Image (tube, rainbow, N blue to C red):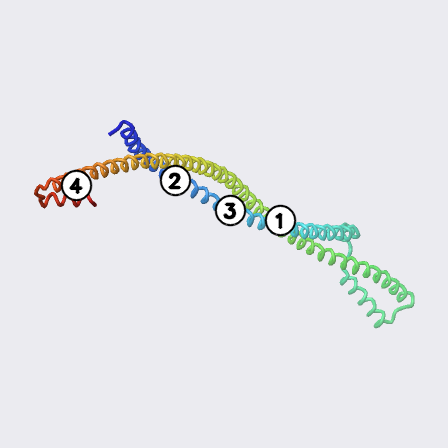
Amino acid sequence: MSDERKRINERFNEVEGEIAELRKKLNKTNNEKEVWFRRKEELKKEIANSIKEARELREEKNKVNIQVKELKEKREKQNSITKEKINQFNELRRGINFRERERKRPADVIKNDIDKIEERIETEALKFSEEKRLMKKIGKLKQEYEGAKKEASALDEIGKIENEIIESKKAAEELHKKVQELAQESKNKHNVYLEISKKIKEVNNEQEKAFNNFLKFKEEFNKIGKEVDEKLEALRDAKNKLDGFRRADKKDKDEAEERTLKKKANDVEEKLKRGEKITKEDLIKFQGGKD
């Protein structure tokens, strides 16, 4: 075997080994690449779900905020009603002198006195002067009675308004309680929203790292793939050269065999010319040389 042929044969075996190692490395790199690609896609899906969750949470929070705004407006309106009732209450109370009222008689007592005097005038034979005095007294009592009735009515109104104030304050308090509950709910949703936003940012960073790793292994995969292609090209080149050597060897062998057969055929022809005896073996040799 020539040095060139030996060198090419050694190179062929060497390249075959290199290709085997590169293919192992290529498969390993491809597995790493696919692992990071799947991880990137998983994180991408996780981010999409978190974004959807955050969007839904924000919409819910906005709805709650609208409710809070509406309830605050109702609460302010109710507080205004309460304030107006309190003003009415104070105005009515200012119209009553409670110290003097303690000394005043109730309207029903005054009415009873009036009825008694009128009955006396109607049933008794009174002197003109006495009747005149009693009529004058009835006039004063009626004034007192009207004042007492008016005051009693005002007190009834004060009591009514006082109850209305209590109910109005209660309604405002209920609205305030609902506002606080919904405001807390809105705050809780906002806190969860912030947590999800933070999570999205963290997962996004993780996804970016996964994507960078995917690109790194993809680049390495392509690089190794290119090396494999180059090695395969070198292997094909070495194989072609070795095939050339084998074809040349076969050609030399075939030509040598042909020369041998022709020589044997010539030997048989010489025997025939010399009239020597031809054996069966000679005929076979002769026939082989003619083919």
Q: Report the disc number at residue 262.
A: none
Give whichever of discs 4 and 1 has the lower sequence position. Answer: 1
Q: Helix or strand or loop: what does disc 3 sit on? A: helix
Q: Nearer the viewer, mark 4 or mark 1?
A: 4
Task: Depth check: give the residue in front, 290 or 191.
Answer: 290
Depicted 93 relative to depicted 230: above or below: below
Q: Residue furthest top?
A: 3
At label 3, the amino acid type is Ala
Which circle marks residue 65 in the picture?
1
Q: Is residue 133 left or right of residue 60?
A: right
Mark 1 surroundings: few (<14), some (14-19) or many (≥20) residues within 10 A = some
Where, quadrant-wise, is the C terminus in this rendering? Answer: top left
In the rendered structure, which disc, 3 or 1, sits on the residue that comes first in sequence? Answer: 3
Q: Is residue 7 above or below residue 167?
A: above
> Label 2 amino acid?
Asn
Say which element carries label 1: helix
Q: Residue 264 location in percent, x, y?
A: 15, 39
**Front residue of this view, candidates 237 and 35:** 237
Label for residue 48?
3
Q: Earlier in the sequence, mark 3 or mark 4?
A: 3
Decide: is 22 above or below 181: above
From the viewer's perspective, is the residue at label 2 or at label 3 nearer? 2
Q: CA distance from mark 3 to mark 1?
A: 25 Å
- Where, by quadrant of the figure, is residue 242 drawn? top left
In the image shown, does 189 or 202 lie closer to the viewer?
202
What residue is at 69 percent from the left and 56 percent from the top? 164
Question: Label 4: which residue?
Answer: 265
In this rendering, the answer to whether 80 lies above or below 227 is below
Q: Which mark is residue 30?
A: 2
